[in-house]
Image (cartoon, rainbow, N blue to C red):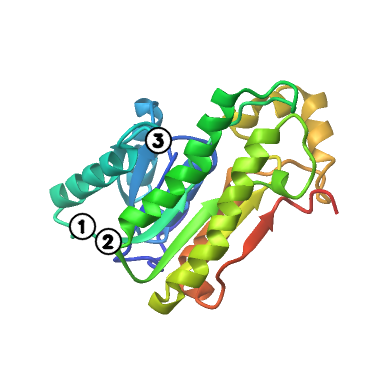
């Protein structure tokens, strides 16, 4: 991941869904910039511990945090375990950076989507971020950073990902409102919207050379995104350099659909 930069030294970050893919890349980048990172995961403990090990090997600081989202008492569980992890490290129970990254997709057109799928997608992509922020307000320090991971699917029509797109659209609406409300505390709130990225979630899109070429063609750069492409944008939004940017949706799709 590279040499520690120290830009985020003294900051504590919570990255949801940080065991794999984009979340792992974000956690590693924030740690490389000096932050102490809580590597949240819902079910895959081994992947989360691997993320922590990678951060430690690079000279950073991190700890795993188990807390399934979209279930009763999910937010309370996350913060109780965050506080416990920080206490064990001798750190105060405060938070500087919250990255709402955890997510999944259940594909289905308007004729196929089910109420259960819709409720699950909304619970993880929209409800959990809202109440993670609400419950975290007393922990978030002045000048904090909230970064929500959305999708380019909110600005193009993807019939097979209808409910997913709707949930991400709700997340973007949350971003704008929170930016207005938290501005007096100099807390910035922004969204990053990736396109097709080579993660486990999108494995079917790059499982064969033909599939990869098809999806790479959507970008003006002729390739699919890498998790680090997204993590670098999040790192900017988490830093002091982004102090005058809030309420924005940063398209990080490689020019998809231009």
On screen, residue 84 versus residue 199, left or right, reads left
Verify CB contact (< 8 Å) between mark 1 and mark 3: no
- Mark 1 or 3: in front is 3
- Residue drawn at 27 percent across, 47 percent down: 79
**Mark 1 closeness class: few <14, some 14–19, many ≥20 residues within 10 Å:** some
Question: Where residue 214 sits: x, y (%)?
Answer: 83, 32
**Mark 2 closeness class: few <14, some 14–19, many ≥20 residues within 10 Å:** some
Q: Which mark is residue 93?
A: 1
- Residue drawn at 38 percent across, 26 percent down: 43
Q: Is residue 28 visible?
A: no
Q: Tell me which corner region of the image, top left, top right, bottom left or bottom right, holds residue 176.
A: bottom right
- Residue drawn at 62 percent across, 22 percent down: 114
Verify CB contact (< 8 Å) between mark 2 and mark 1: yes
Question: Where residue 183 sits: x, y (%)?
Answer: 46, 75
Rounded to the nearest angstrom, the CA distance separating label 2 from label 1 is 7 Å
Question: Where residue 106 sits: x, y (%)?
Answer: 62, 26
Question: Number of numbered discs present?
Answer: 3
User: To which residue does mark 3 refer?
Assistant: 69
Rounded to the nearest angstrom, the CA distance separating label 2 from label 3 is 19 Å
First-in-chain label (2 vs 1): 1
First-in-chain label (1 vs 3): 3
Q: Residue 41 versus residue 63: which sits nearer the camera?
A: 41
In the picture shown, does residue 67 fall above or below 250? above
Q: Which mark is residue 44?
A: none
Rounded to the nearest angstrom, the CA distance separating label 1 from label 3 is 21 Å
């Amino acid at each position: 991941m590279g040499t520690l930069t120290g830009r985020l030294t003294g900051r504590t970050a919570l990255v949801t869904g940080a065991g794999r893919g984009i979340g792992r890349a974000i956690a590693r980048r924030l740690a490389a910039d000096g932050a102490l990172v809580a590597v949240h995961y819902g079910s895959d403990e081994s992947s989360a511990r691997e993320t922590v090990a990678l951060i430690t090997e690079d000279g950073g600081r991190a700890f795993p945090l188990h807390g399934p989202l979209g279930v009763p008492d999910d937010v309370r569980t996350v913060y109780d375990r965050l506080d416990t992890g920080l206490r064990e490290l001798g750190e105060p129970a405060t938070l500087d950076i919250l990255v709402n990254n955890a997510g999944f997709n259940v594909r289905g057109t308007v004729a196929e989507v089910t109420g259960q799928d819709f409720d699950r997608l909304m619970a993880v992509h929209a409800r959990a971020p809202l109440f993670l922020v609400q419950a975290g307000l007393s922990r978030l320090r002045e000048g904090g950073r909230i970064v929500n991971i959305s999708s380019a699917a909110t600005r193009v029509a993807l019939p097979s990902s209808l409910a997913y797109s709707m949930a991400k659209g709700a997340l973007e609406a949350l971003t704008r409102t929170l930016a207005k409300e938290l501005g007096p505390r100099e807390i910035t709130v922004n969204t990053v919207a990736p396109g097709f990225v080579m993660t486990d979630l999108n494995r079917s899109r790059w499982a064969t050379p033909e599939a990869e070429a098809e999806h790479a063609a959507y970008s003006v750069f002729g390739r699919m995104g890498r998790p680090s492409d997204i993590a670098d944008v999040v790192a900017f939004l988490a830093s002091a350099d982004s102090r005058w940017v809030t309420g924005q949706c940063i398209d990080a799709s490689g020019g998809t659909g231009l």
